[in-house]
Amino acid sequence: MVAAVRVHKFGGPEVLTYEEVAVPPPGPGQIRVKQYACGVNFVDAYFRMGLYPTPGGLPFVIGNEAAGEVVEAGAGVTDFKPGDRVAYVSGPGCYAEERVVAADRAVKLPAKIGYEQAAAMMLKGLTVQYLLRRACNVGKGTTLLMHAAAGGVGLILCQWANHLGATVIGTVGSKEKAALARANGAHHTILYRDEDFVARVKEITGGKSCDVVYDGVGKTTFPGSLDCLRPLGLFVSFGSASGQIEAFNINILQQKGSLFATRPTLNTYAAKREDLLKMADDLFAVVGNGAVKIPINQTYKLRDAAKAHRDLEGRATTGSSILVP
């Protein structure tokens, strides 16, 4: 039996239950991992609230990314052996001292990447990788808007986009978060509670607007995000922290400048193992050479997962948050 955090009914952070669960031996193509750190992400809250389906129904162990050491490999596993240091995005099931995970979802950690750093960056860092390198090919000359620029994805994206030569505009909720975003590569920040972010984007860009908008906020920033785009610009909706974007008339994209819109997910971009490995190598490279730093600004004990969720949803966190078993 190992300690884990389970959801027995959908709801707020209070439904997270710290308890003991049994972990089976790994089956064919699986590995059992002793976990040293688990990442905390908004998608965890979506599962907790029942917004995303869980394959096995209730109850379930929550969590979508972690890092640890392989303790046992199942039949047919050739890429991993006991003692290997690994990290992965595969959920739910991560808020636990140990778990079994599909071997093809795990990647080996380079020596210079620690467990806590890996758990803080796998989901968010791989998300940023596909946002910047595949959903849109960001580089020199690109002007982009990143909502929630001081959040976990935001701070990584600001650094990486800056490294690629883009002009980065970020929305934030406070002066402290604005300073944090600028320290991590944002060239301009907008206090969305005090300023009209659409008007400020037009002011910052001299009326030219942005090539791409990355929006993980959702309901409260739509359709304003579309008004921040130049003709033929790209709207990337990758999260719904403020609620889902409701159905809209697709003609609005034509009216606002023949815009493109996408709702990508990491699961799709990393579905093939060869793509996952390339994405992870790209992430490890920019972290390893110091171009992107992973700020772990909140660390909680595994038993305190409910507090971690309250802080995350209350916008009381910056950068990455992790749970330590």
Image (cartoon, helix red, strand yellow):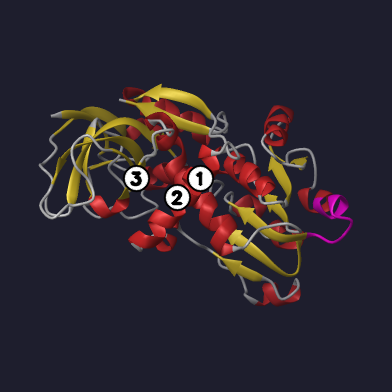
Rendering coords of residue 245 (x, y %): 56, 59
Q: Residue at x 25, y 38 (%)?
A: 84
Q: Residue at x 51, y 36 (%)?
A: 313
- Judging depth in this view, the residue of 2 and 31 nearest the camera is 31
- Marked residue nearer the N-terminal end (1 or 3): 3
Residue at point 49% right, 51% down? 282
Which region is colored magenta?
A: 201-209
In magenta segment, residue 118: no
10 Å neighbourhood of mark 3: few (<14), some, or many (≥20)?
A: many
CB within 8 Å, label 1 to label 3: no
Q: Is 42 left, or right, of 253 in this rendering?
A: left
Where residue 154 appears, x then y in whole percent? 60, 43
**Does residue 239 appear in the picture of this structure?**
no
Question: Which of label 1 and label 3 is nearer to you?
Answer: 1
The x and y percentages for residue 229 are: 74, 63
Residue 202: in magenta span? yes
* Residue nearest the viewer, comparing 71 with 123: 71
Q: Are marks 3 and 2 in contact (CB under 8 Å)?
A: no
Q: What residue did someone put label 2 on?
A: 281
Q: Which mark is residue 88?
A: 3
Q: Which residue is mark 1?
A: 285
Which amino acid does the dot numbered 2 rest on?
Answer: Asp
Q: Quadrant of the C terminus?
A: top left
Q: CA distance from mark 3 to mark 2?
A: 13 Å
Q: Secondary structure at mark 2?
A: helix
